[in-house]
Structure formats: C-alpha cells, structure tokens
Image: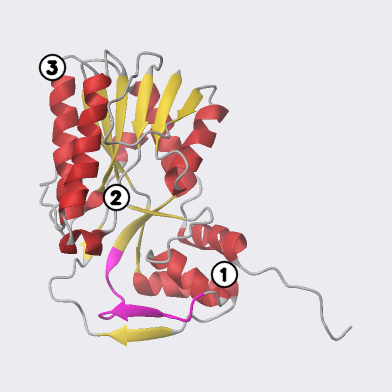
Amino acid sequence: MRVLVTGATGYVGRAVVRELQVHGHEPVLSRQRLSEPFELDDVDAVVHLAAVARVRESFLDPLPYYETNVGGTLNLLKALKGQRFLLASTGTVYRPSDAVLTEDSVREPSSPYAASKAAAEDLVAWAARSGQIGATTLRLFNVAGGGDTDTTRVITRAVACAAGTVPGMEVYGDGGAVRDFVHVRDVAAAFVVALEACSVGTSSVYNVGATAASVRDVLDAVAEVTGRTVDVTWKPAVPGEIRSLRADASRLRALGWEPRSSALTEIVRDQWLASAPVPGPDPSR
C-alpha cells in the first residue's frame, strides 16, 4: 500500500516508516501543516502520528492541543475517500486503575492532551461508522528505546543520567508508580499489523503496551545495564498521581503482533547503546 505518514520524521514516525518499507509498503512522508486542507487521492492509507504531546504543558495552554490534535485529525478525515486511517492515541485516555486496562475500560482523560486524543478517537470512530473509511486507533503506552531524545520520559532520562549527559533526575513519591513500557520498534510493528487488518467500514481500537515496571524497576535496570547508578533527587508525591497504568494488549496479539524488543533490560540496553558517549582517545598518549 501507499501510506501517508504524518509525523514521519519524529521519534515514532521514523520507526514506522522503516517498518512499512520492510513489509513492502510505500511510505509517503507528509510535510504539510495539519491546519491546511489535504489532498489524499493518491494514497491507500494514512498513519496519523503528528501531534502536540506535552502533558504538563497542556494544562497551561490547552487550546493548541485541541487545535492540532483534533483539528488536524478532522482535516485529514475530510480528505479521505474510502481509505484506511490509523490514529496514534494514548493510554492516558483511560480512567486510572490498579487493574490491567483493556480497550473496553472506561475512558477518563486526566489531562487536556489526553482529552484532545479522546476527542480525535471519537471523530475517527464516527467517520468509520458512516462507512466512509476504515479506522484503527492504537493507544500507545510508554514508548521507549531506539535512541529516544526526549529526556522528560523516565527511561530516556535515567539512561541519560547514567551517561552523564543530564545532571540528574527527580522522582516524585516512593518510585513505586507503575507504567507499561513498549519498545518503539514494537510500536512500529503494531502499526503495520493493524494497517493490514483494517478494512473500510470498520473501527477498531488496540492497546500497545508490553512490560509493566515501576520507576524503581527502571532505575535498577539502568544500574544493571550500565554499571552506573542514577543520581536521583527524591521529591514528595504529587497529589493525585496515577499509581498504575498497565495495558492488556491481548486484542493486538490476536492479530499476530508480538513484542520482540520490549523486555525492560532490552529497552534500557538499546537506549544506552544509542546514547552513551563514545570514549575518545586518551590525551595522555
């Protein structure tokens, strides 16, 4: 298939483009602004990854999140004529729960960012129900590995601390908060599996997660892989902090998806190899 990819030069986008090529599809890299009208007659499908995605920032200025994440999705949907459409959403659309979350768990977005993604999900689902498109939403949990550069993410930050490229990290609470991590390569594979299973007139939702781990688990894994401890400043817990966000990905696995790179130590090792400084020549010689 000929597949338009928005956000193709971003962290997840680069991995998706490579995976599409490996499976014989032709990725088309979109460089168009989401606020502009689209012409999509020459593609068979769209993988929509472009978004603004800073959770804390969204509380301070929520309007651009709706403008981009909802308005951009609407502009793409207006241009579709029977194609397949895949939306990258987020596991934070769910109501936090100690239970493992399935695709049927209650949605209760906890930030303007997550709320904008939930609204985009609804747009996509209604468009599919009308018979105009085939639609799939993938709710991504904590994507990691693959040389990520965003040090606001816990694994990336901890590895950067071990590498000495950032001075340290702050952990709020006791480090027991659990998140679900998945390697970016496995995320890319999920998009290809979902693309090939999508058909016009249907709407599907899949969780994309693989390995549940606490912040302390991450710190221990970084120490094990790198042989270095992470300089942590412990802070009081943030009131209302989500203690657990774990994904049930069995629906996606039923399509044949299998996370192959998402063991915690493998994610950390991959991030370490991509970001650790290369030793230079010994100046004393």
- The local crowd at label 1, few if under 14, some if 14 to 19, many if 20 or more residues have their Cα within 10 Å, is some
- Residue placed furthest toward the front: 36
* Residue 114 position in % (x across, y down): 19, 51
Query: Circle 2 sits in a helix, a strand or a loop, which is it?
Result: loop
Alpha carbon of mark 3 to alpha carbon of mark 1: how far?
50 Å
* Amino acid marked by disc 1: Val
* Residue 94 position in % (x across, y down): 16, 50
Image position of 144 (left or right of 36) = right
User: In the depicted view, which residue is nearer to us: 76 or 133?
Assistant: 76
Query: Can you tell which of label 3 and label 1 is closer to the viewer?
Result: 3
Which residue in the structure is indicated by mark 2?
52
Residue at x 35% of width, y 26% of height: 46
- Residue 225, which numbered label? 1
Proximity of marks 2 and 1: CB atoms separated by less than 8 Å = no
Task: Identify the image quadrant of residue 142.
Answer: bottom left
Q: Which residues are magenta?
A: 166-178
- The local crowd at label 3, few if under 14, some if 14 to 19, many if 20 or more residues have their Cα within 10 Å, is few
For marks 3 and 1 on the same chain, the one whose residue lies earlier in the sequence: 3
Task: Identify the image quadrant of residue 252.
Answer: top left
Query: Circle 1 sits in a helix, a strand or a loop, which is it?
Result: helix
